[in-house]
Amino acid sequence: MRFINWIGELVGSFIPVILLALVIISVGADVVGRNVFSAPIFGASEVSVLAFVWLVWLGVIGAAKRDDLMGVRYFVDLLPPRGRRLVHATMNVLVALIAAGVIYAAIMQIRTARFTTFMSIGVPKWVMSVGLAISMAAIFVMYLARAWSEFRQVRSVGR
């Protein structure tokens, strides 16, 4: 379990910080190069777009790991313990189902974007959709595990 938590921290928190630094550096260097030296950095905008997209997708994993994706906790916490657990379990299943739908959409994007590339850096555009599929797969697994845990606790609270 500690290894899984370590991977979650690495993928959901540490790597997004590095990607944010890459975005800031590439955009900043391109702006300075363009405005001060009249020489833009070839491919900097595409690198920053790719880094930002992956930053968002991996950051979603970190937010899900910290249980920061849902904003209805205030109202759910007003319920009695058994009702609270049942609502949490149901919400976790719904989030997992939504993630499964997004995985399907990401796969369709990957299939249709196979033949296009970023012009200056030559990276295929489907790489962005892979990040979406990976983050949604992680969320799918996390939220199904949470739902399972909540449903088990609903049964134990009811006894």
Image (spheres, grey):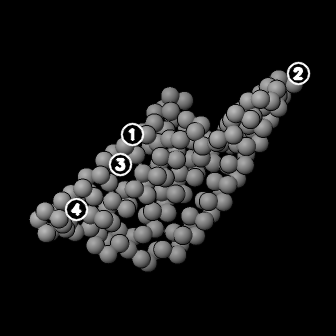
Name which of mark 3 and mark 1 comes first in the sequence: 1
Q: Which mark is residue 20?
A: 3
Name which of mark 3 and mark 2 comes first in the sequence: 3
Mark whose residue sits in front, 3 or 1: 3
Contact between labelled residues 1 and 3, with CB atoms less than 8 Å apart: no
In this rendering, does residue 154 appear at all?
A: no
For disc 1, the neighbor class at 10 Å (few under 14, some 14 to 19, many from 20) is some
Name which of mark 2 and mark 4 comes first in the sequence: 4
Name which of mark 1 and mark 4 comes first in the sequence: 1
Name which of mark 2 and mark 1 comes first in the sequence: 1
Q: Residue at x 63, y 48 (%)?
A: 140
For disc 2, the neighbor class at 10 Å (few under 14, some 14 to 19, many from 20) is few
**On the rendered structure, is 144 left or right of 67?**
right
Q: Which mark is residue 100?
A: none
Q: Secondary structure at mark 4?
A: helix
Q: Quadrant of residue 106?
A: bottom right
Label 2 belongs to which residue? 159
| Residue 63 position in % (x across, y down) | 53, 41
Label 1 belongs to which residue? 14
* Label 3, label 1: how far apart the Cα atoms are: 10 Å
Callout 2 amino acid: Arg
| Residue 8 position in % (x across, y down) | 49, 38
Callout 3 amino acid: Leu
Q: Which mark is residue 30?
A: 4
Mark whose residue sits in front, 3 or 2: 3
